[in-house]
Amino acid sequence: MKTNLSGLTRGLTMAALICAASLFNARAADEQHGQLSSKDYKFVSAATQGGNMEVTLGQIAVQKASEQSIREFGQRMVTDHTKANIELKELISQKGATLPDLSSKMDDMTRDHLNGLSGKDFDKAYIKQMVKDHKKDVKEFQKQADKGDDADLKAWVTKTLPILQEHLRLAENIETSLNGAVSQASK
């Protein structure tokens, strides 16, 4: 009987510890989110990660691109996304939210891949990545502008969306120009 009670006590103690850990984790998640809903927090996390990546890749483009238009586009990415990142960071802080380290293996792979390229190969791969990224960004920002919960975040998104749309247009124009130059060179 004593062994049975001892096992029961251990089981109850373990259950209490699990409940306490769950409550602690829930509180920690709430503290990370601050005043932002889970949906808005997920968006700001992705937007911050994406913005940081645009700056990093833009810096690489400024150094490695063989085409002047791509170096200029890279510098624009650094300038515009740095400004947007600062604004978003301030907004996140005002909402009492904190973001964990946002680096991903996919970002690391993309950065390493582009760093391994040079000349026209770099130019084509970088601008292709920018078109892809900005198509995704425009879609996500539009969704957030339409369905986001936090009014301040929606205002920032609405202000930032036209800049991303301009980036997409510029990237698509450069990509078209590069593909046209490749077609002309092969004739």
Image: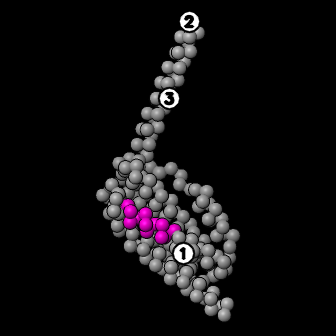
Q: Could you tell me residue 152's position as x and y percent?
A: 32, 58
Asked if residue 103 is positioned above or below residue 60 in the image, the reply reads: above
Callout 3 environment at 10 Å: few (<14), some (14 to 19), or many (20+)?
Answer: few
Of 147 and 80, which appears nearest the observer?
A: 147
Q: State which quadrant residue 64 falls in.
A: bottom right
Q: Could you tell me residue 108's position as x and y percent?
A: 62, 60
Q: Residue at x 66, y 65 (%)?
A: 112
Look at the numbered discs 1 and 2 and tell me whether their residues touch, using CB distance below 8 Å.
no
Q: Secondary structure at mark 3?
A: helix
The three-letter code of the residue at mark 2 reads: Met
Of 49 and 71, which appears nearest the observer?
A: 49
Residue at the bottom extreme of this rendering: 187
Callout 1 environment at 10 Å: few (<14), some (14 to 19), or many (20+)?
Answer: many
Residue stretch in magenta: 133-144
State the residue position of label 1.
74
State the residue position of label 3.
18
Asked if residue 153 is positioned above or below residue 21 in the image, the reply reads: below
Residue 1: mark in rendering: 2
The three-letter code of the residue at mark 3 reads: Ile
Specify which label sits upstream in the sequence, 1 or 2.
Answer: 2
